[in-house]
Amino acid sequence: MPQALRSTRMNEPQNRRIAVIGLGAMGGAMAATLHRAGWEVTGFDPSDAAREAAASTGISTTDNLAAVAGTPYAVLSLPAASIVETTVPQLLAAPGTVAIVDTTTSEPATSKHMAGLAEAQGAAFIDAPVSGGRDGAATGTLSAFVGATDAALAAAEPVLLALTGGNYSHIGGPGSGNVVKLLNNVLAAANLASVGEALGVAKAYGIDPATAAASISGASGGSKVSANMYPNWVLTGTHDSGFSMGLMARDASLAVDIAKQIGEKPALLATVANQWQDALAVLGPKADFTEIARTVAPAITPAGAPATGTSAETGTKASAATPDATSPAA
């Protein structure tokens, strides 16, 4: 991603009150980062467990979204665009909002609509889906794909700086950050499947998959998937990335759907999206997304191939549209 490294001293807000909406794995970590950076954070989540985890880090919490309406700044970390659509109007219901930063992997039409609602009330809304996982959220080193007007970006920049250290790209107007984040995720989805298949071939040839992954990672076929994801989460069998199968399958499908809406037909990406739907039906939405390896190359994963046919949780084929967590997480 193109990077723009900006001074964290720029645009320091006079009012450092901020609400974090969604205290799941990502939202909770972002709330803790903002708290350590000196922001006065109030976290909202309907889950008792999520609120208790946030409170243990010193963050004030509430189960009443109306209680944080009109807070000058807000960060959204939600599981779906539909929840963004119902949340933003409630935050804008009281005066005082300066900027809402939506880190959700949402949909561009939703972000355009929310940006319009905010602007009509003198507030800013930016779509800023993030990359970097829990570690990046916990250390303020996320990267972000930003869709916003110049004025909205300027209003939201203090929050972006706290979460990314300035490592964000202003892609274009409202919704454009969502588009590029979805494209990023479908490319990662493709790479997870293709690297798994390649390492499966290496294993069948009698080559240690870890050795093959390390060798490939230093050459032209290398990627974060071969260098980090497979060695750390797949070959070890831990599958503890913190990002779910349900969310990745959803993102891959959304990327293809957005392409179709503008008349594009990405054949390879469509095949990848279908492959993730097949894995979702077998593994269920709560499986870690790195468990795709268990369906594309079961011989290289300690757990081997999963049971086939139905989701262990529902007994039926799972849907990528089903939220993956009881508490919101990006």
Image (tube, grey):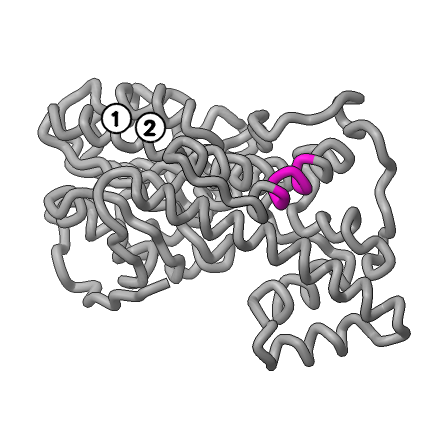
Q: Quadrant of residue 191?
A: bottom right
Q: Quadrant of residue 168?
A: bottom left
Q: Which residues are magenta?
A: 271-277
Q: Main secondary structure of the magenta part?
A: helix
Which of these two is toward me, 161 or 129?
129
Looking at the picture, does residue 221 appear above or below residue 296?
A: below
Q: Is residue 289 magenta?
A: no
Q: Quadrant of residue 97?
A: top left
Q: Is 137 situated left or right of 326 in this image? A: left
Question: Which residue in the protein does label 1 denote?
Answer: 113
Question: Which residue in the protein does label 2 denote?
Answer: 110
Q: Are marks 2 and 1 in contact (CB under 8 Å)?
A: yes
Q: Secondary structure at mark 1?
A: helix
Residue 192 locus on image (x, y percent)? 64, 56
Q: Could you tell me which residue is drawn at 71 percent across and 48 percent down?
A: 292
Quadrant of the image containing the N terminus: bottom left
> Is residue 51 in sight in this rendering?
no
Q: Is 102 situated left or right of 328 in this image? A: left
Q: Hey, what amino acid is under mark 2? A: Thr
Q: Could you tell me which residue is drawn at 54 percent across and 41 percent down?
A: 252
Residue 293 locus on image (x, y percent)? 74, 53
Q: Could you tell me which residue is drawn at 79 percent across and 71 percent down?
A: 209
Q: Is residue 275 magenta?
A: yes
Q: Hey, what amino acid is under mark 1? A: His
